[in-house]
Amino acid sequence: MSYRRVRGNLKPEYLRLKEAMTVFSMGPEKIEALARECGAYYKIDKVVLINYEALRDYIETFREN
């Protein structure tokens, strides 16, 4: 994955909504809905932050074998 804010092997704990849309290849409505379901959605003033690890782990639960 390539993030604008990543240095070395560090991954950001939180992504802004636009970054999350790029990383997860989904639209804003779907990202917000999934993030709210799993408790990874934070809104501070007008800034939306998504907890990367929580959302990634939640999305993994939908994996079909």
Image (cartoon, helix red, strand yellow):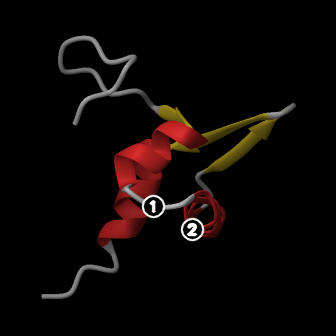
Give the residue number, with chain letter if any, for mark 1.
Answer: 26
Residue found farthest to the left = 65
As drawn, the label of residue 52 is none
Q: Residues within 10 Å of mark 1 (few under 14, many from 20)?
A: few
Local packing at callout 2 (Cα closer than 10 Å; few below 14, some 14-19, many 20+) is: few
- Against 10, residue 60 (above or below) is below
The three-letter code of the residue at mark 2 reads Lys
Residue 24 screen position, x and y as percent: 37, 54
The residue shown at (18%, 21%) is 9
SS for callout 1? loop
Residue 38 vs residue 17, the one in the foreground:
17
Tell me if residue 29 comes above or below residue 15 in the rendering: below
| Relative to 34, residue 5 above or below | above
Task: Say which quarter of the image contains residue 63.
Answer: bottom left
Which residue is the extreme one toward the bottom? 65
Query: For numbered disc 2, what is the local secondary structure?
Result: helix
- Amino acid beneath label 1: Met
How far across and down, in percent of the image, does residue 27 sit? 53, 61
Question: Is residue 41 positioned above or below 49 on the image?
Answer: below
- Mark 2 — residue? 30
Q: Which residue does the image show at 45% across and 61% down from the upper left?
A: 26
Q: Is disc 1 in contact with disc 2, using a CB cutoff of under 8 Å?
A: yes
